[in-house]
Image (spheres, helix red, strand yellow):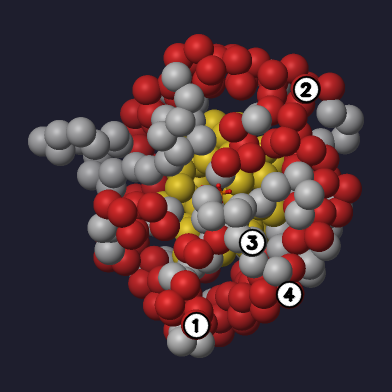
Amino acid sequence: MKKPFVAGNWKMNTNGHTSMDLADRLASAFTELAGRNVTVAVFPPFVYLQAVGKALNGSGIALGAQDVYFEPDGAFTGEISISMLRDIGCNYCLCGHSERRHVIGETDGLIRKKVSAAISGGLLPILCVGELLEERKASRTNEVVTRQIKEGLSGLSAEKLAAVIIAYEPVWAIGTGLTATPQQAQEVHDFIRKLLSQMYNQRSAEDIRILYGGSVKPDNAAELMGQKDVDGVLVGGASLKANDFLVIIRAVMRFKMPV
Ligand code: PEP
């Protein structure tokens, strides 16, 4: 059964007070949402994960981390391990978010280690891929996404692939207010599914969830979700406003029924 997925990436936003307020609002609204044909997870900053997790407890909203380190423990100052995240109730982690690739400088090789270690350690990774504006203009979108997926999943068995979620996030659409058109999103999602079918098999490619991310808002979520290969959304800015995020969740629930 492929449930649609809505992820809320809070990035380096909120403080102790506003993170709790947001979590409380989401928890009480989500508890009342009938049906719940959707998986929802939020990705707060590390320092608020535990408190947000407590506030969400019993609501049905899952907890995720914005990043993770691949080593189990040791002299890695500033890093957070998979078992630490599991310890405080995290089930998901983002791997290779565009801001980590392009601002912090993470490589495909490092991201591959994170994806692989996350699965082995019991965290479900969301592998983020997407092209820069100049790469799209040069018609290199498919080439870039192919490299990121092939390298990010390198060595991963079909069995382990079942734990992975892919997020297609064109870098030019993240935090810019520019959204890929539903057709542009569908084209790349379809391309990714075909690529996975070649790398693995058709069944694995059909089962995997491919999210779209990049300026998803209450007024464009439904149209994006109406696309055949869009299985959910990764939301940044709009996930910081409880009402906006809830409108997006409802749009996803309406458009995608589990198969
Ligand atoms: C993101 O954080 O992955 C994202 C897509 O951000 P925004 O929705 O603000 O573009």
Of the residues shown, which amino acid type is indicated by label 2? Ala
Q: Taking 197 as reference, is 16 above or below it? A: above
**Which residue in the structure is indicated by mark 2?**
29
**Which residue in the structure is indicated by mark 4?**
183
- Locate the N terminus and report the quarter of the image it occupies: bottom right
**Which residue in the structure is indicated by mark 1?**
137
Tell me which numbered mark, 2 or 3, is placed earlier along the sequence: 2
Tell me the mark number nearer the camera, choosing from 2 and 1.
Answer: 1
Q: Residues within 10 Å of mark 4 (few under 14, many from 20)?
A: few
**Which residue in the structure is indicated by mark 3?**
179
Of the residues shown, which amino acid type is indicated by label 1? Lys
Q: Give the secondary structure at mark 4.
A: helix
Dot 2 and dot 3 residues touching (CB under 8 Å): no
Residue depicted at 27% across the width and 63% down the height: 107
Residue 230 shown left or right of residue 108 in the figure: right
Tell me which numbered mark, 4 or 1, is placed earlier along the sequence: 1
- Locate the C terminus and report the quarter of the image it occupies: bottom right
Image coordinates of residue 68 in percent, x first then y, are 34, 42
Q: Residues within 10 Å of mark 2 (few under 14, many from 20)?
A: some
